[in-house]
Each structure stands twice: as structure tokens, then as C-alpha cells.
């Protein structure tokens, strides 16, 4: 019998995957598939809380799948699927809407941030998407979920929903535990180290995408913000030198070197040598991923096979949970 624990994660195809998407969640995922029964998805239902160009959304969803595989997610060893292909997400999402409180949803900092950024489109989905996220998680009864620290609040909400729902109907959902990786947990914008590097910041010079040309990557790093003090030395001090700390985090993730080793390596060399070195390390880290992603993207039949098989497998698991929920709340069986 398969004793592997289950885990699940997804990324919205709301923009091209960035270095933040990679060093935050994505590069941890392949290590997980040996140990856990993993479900990874393209969260297209979540992407439409912000208006998307339909052709771009379709293209990015498939590119994201190709990039997942290129980053080491072997479809034979984990389940890769497109969220909208597994209808149980939207269905359970609705049910959970009825078990989340207006007050709880109003407190979500992401809702506040996103409504401020999309003042002309503060739609209902933006408000209730944490319920859909709870459904994404709970359908698969995972043991834990890897999340960036900005998603911690959503996992808390999912846990509240579980407590509330199980309190009424018995043990329906497994209580999910958040897993927050330590190094590389949060990659900041190269031009504004106070803001996270985001996929949807179009035209932002602070962003590096997974598929950026090496010349573009080098240019972005050469103009990255370091700090304004006169010391100009490479030292890990996130509070006083957030730009340098961000670059050190990126360099450390790309090379496997510790912060102490990096400080020694650039001792007395200043930022003029450090910034291009970070750029080169990133170019080298991404090179094999880019080549593999291009190769996979060219094989549409293969990609289609992967997402169809993934949706079938995910649906089978998700349906078991949904049926149980429908029965518990009192829906007549089909
Ligand atoms: N810069 C980042 N550093 C570390 N982790 C990051 N994540 C996103 N950006 C960084 C983590 O990626 C997971 C999935 O992200 P998502 O696309 O579902 O949501 P998001 O956090 O809203 O990502 P973006 O890039 O900021 O999207 P947009 O621009 O559309 O809002 C999450 O675990 C997240 O922490």
C-alpha cells in the first residue's frame, strides 16, 4: 500500500514565472516528489480575479506547465494539472464560501493589497478567493502545503474552515499544516527591495522571469538597487541593506554558498563585481531550465497528454472528498 503523505501547491498563470516563483516555491517542489504524493497545478481560476487577456492566459498556462516539467517535475512521479480542468475546485469553493465569515475574509491582507492595486475592479472573486484556495487544499486532504510567508494567512483561514466544518459534520477534512521553506522564502524586487518580486508587475525593471534572455538578466542585475550607505560592502544585513541581502539570497540559492562564504568571496570588491556575479549565477542556473522548457513547449501533443492525465488523476481524488462533503451538507446524491 502507498504510505506516502500528500502535498499540493499551485501558482497562478497571472504573469510569466519569475525568479521569485522559482526560488520561492518551485525549486523546492522536485525534491518533494520522491518523498510525497504531490499535486502541482496551474491556478487559472485564481488568475481571473484580475482581468486577463484570454490569449495570454492560455499561452502562459501551457508555458507554466512546460516550465514546471523543465524545473524537474516529472509527470510520471507527480500529478500536474490545470485547475479549471478539475471542476471539483470550483464546486467545493462555493460550499466553503458558506463556511467562511465576512469578517475573516475582510481581514485578508492580500485582499486589501490587491484591491488597492486594482481599484477599478474590486470584484467578488478577489474577496472570496481564499475560500477557493481552501478548496484547492482540502480536496486532496494533504498533510502539509508549502507556501510563501505571504500565504500563511490563507492557510490559517483554511484551518479555521476545517475546524468549523468538522465541528458540525465530523472528521471530513484533514487539518492542513503550512510548510515554509527557510532560504529563498521571499525574493524581492531588484529595484524596490521593500516589495516582493511579482509576476504581474509588467514593465517592472525589478523583475527577472524564468525565460528571460541572458542579456536581459545581466542588465537587470547590473542596475539592481543595493543600498545608499557609504560602506559599499557585501554584508548580510536585511534590515539596513535589504537590496544587498536580497541579492545575497538569490546568489546563495543559485550557487549553494552560505552568506559567510559570499561575504568572504566579495570582501573588498564592492558592488561593481558582486552584481554581475549574481547575474551570471542566475543565467547559469536558468540555462538548462530554459532549454528544456523550449523543447517541451514545442511538443504540444506531449503537453496535452500530461495535463489530461493529470486532470483525470486529480479529479479522482478530488471527487472522493467532494462527494463526502455533498452528502454531509445534505445534497441528494446523483
Ligand atoms: N517573489 C517571491 N518570492 C518568494 N515566493 C514567491 N511567491 C510568489 N512570488 C514570490 C510564491 O509563489 C506561490 C504562488 O504564487 P501565486 O502566483 O499563486 O501568488 P502570488 O504570491 O500573488 O504571486 P505573484 O507573482 O505576486 O502574482 P501576482 O503578480 O499575479 O499577484 C506563493 O506561495 C507565493 O508565496
Image (cartoon, rainbow, N blue to C red):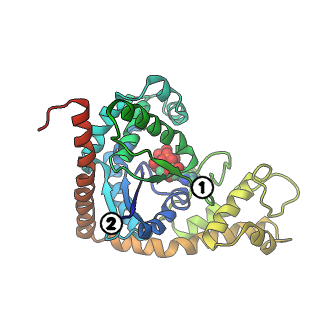
Q: Considering the numbered disc 2 on the image, is that residue within a helix, a strand or a loop?
A: loop
Q: Nearer the viewer, residue 205 or 181?
A: 181
* Label 2 residue near ligand 1, CB within 8 Å: no
Q: Contact, CB < 8 Å: mark 2 with mark 1? A: no
Q: Nearer the viewer, residue 4 or 239?
A: 4
Q: CA distance from mark 2 to mark 1?
A: 30 Å
Quadrant assignment for the C terminus: top left
What is the x, y in percent for residue 170? 34, 36
What is the x, y in percent for residue 117? 52, 34
What is the x, y in percent for residue 294? 38, 71
Most extreme residue toward the left is: 334
Quadrant housing residue 255:
bottom right
The answer to whether residue 58 of the structure is visible from this angle is: yes
Numbered marks: total: 2
Q: Which residue is labeled 1 in the image? A: 185
Q: Nearer the viewer, residue 229 or 172?
A: 172
Quadrant assignment for the N terminus: bottom left
Lateral position of residue 127 relative to residue 191, left or right? left
Q: Which mark is residue 133?
A: none
Quadrant housing residue 70:
bottom left
* Residue at image location 74% in from the left, 68% down from the top: 274
Neighbours of disc 2 within 10 Å: few (<14), some (14-19), many (20+): few
Most extreme residue toward the top is: 103
What is the x, y in percent for residue 282? 59, 69
State which tag comes first along the sequence, 2 or 1: 2
* Label 1 residue near ligand 1, CB within 8 Å: yes
Q: Which residue is labeled 2 in the image? A: 2
* Residue at image location 26% in from the left, 67% down from the top: 300
Lateral position of residue 244 relative to residue 131, left or right? right
The answer to whether residue 203 of the structure is visible from this angle is: no
Q: Nearer the viewer, residue 54 or 160?
A: 160
Amino acid at each position: 500500500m502507498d504510505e506516502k503523505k500528500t502535498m499540493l501547491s499551485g501558482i497562478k498563470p497571472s504573469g510569466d514565472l519569475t525568479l521569485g516563483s522559482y526560488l520561492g516555491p518551485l525549486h523546492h517542489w522536485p525534491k518533494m516528489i520522491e518523498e510525497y504524493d504531490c499535486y502541482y497545478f496551474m491556478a487559472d481560476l485564481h488568475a481571473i480575479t484580475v482581468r486577463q487577456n484570454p490569449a495570454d492566459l492560455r499561452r502562459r498556462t501551457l508555458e507554466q506547465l512546460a516550465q514546471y516539467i523543465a524545473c524537474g517535475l516529472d509527470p510520471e512521479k507527480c500529478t500536474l494539472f490545470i485547475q479549471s480542468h478539475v471542476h471539483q475546485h470550483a464546486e467545493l469553493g462555493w460550499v466553503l464560501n458558506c463556511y467562511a465569515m465576512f469578517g475573516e475574509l475582510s481581514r485578508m491582507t492580500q485582499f486589501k493589497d490587491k484591491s488597492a492595486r486594482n481599484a477599478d475592479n474590486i470584484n467578488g472573486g478577489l474577496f472570496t478567493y481564499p475560500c477557493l484556495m481552501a478548496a484547492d487544499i482540502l480536496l486532496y486532504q494533504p498533510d502539509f502545503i508549502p507556501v510563501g510567508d505571504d500565504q500563511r494567512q490563507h492557510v490559517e483561514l483554511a484551518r479555521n474552515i476545517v475546524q468549523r466544518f468538522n465541528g458540525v459534520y465530523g472528521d471530513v477534512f484533514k487539518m492542513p499544516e503550512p510548510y515554509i521553506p527557510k532560504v529563498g522564502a521571499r525574493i524581492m524586487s531588484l529595484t524596490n527591495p521593500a516589495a516582493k518580486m511579482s509576476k504581474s508587475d509588467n514593465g517592472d525593471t525589478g523583475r527577472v522571469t524564468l525565460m528571460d534572455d541572458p542579456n536581459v538578466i545581466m542588465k537587470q542585475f547590473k542596475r539592481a538597487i543595493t543600498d545608499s550607505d557609504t560602506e559599499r560592502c557585501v554584508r548580510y544585513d536585511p534590515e539596513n541593506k535589504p537590496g544587498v541581502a536580497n541579492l545575497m539570497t538569490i546568489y546563495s540559492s543559485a550557487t549553494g554558498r552560505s552568506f559567510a562564504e559570499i561575504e568572504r568571496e566579495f570582501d573588498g570588491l564592492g558592488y561593481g563585481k558582486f552584481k554581475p556575479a549574481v547575474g551570471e549565477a542566475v543565467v547559469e542556473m536558468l540555462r538548462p531550465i530554459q532549454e528544456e522548457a523550449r523543447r517541451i513547449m514545442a511538443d504540444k501533443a506531449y503537453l496535452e497528454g500530461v495535463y489530461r492525465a493529470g486532470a483525470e488523476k486529480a479529479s479522482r481524488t478530488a471527487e472522493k472528498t467532494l462527494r463526502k462533503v455533498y452528502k454531509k451538507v445534505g445534497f441528494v446524491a446523483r
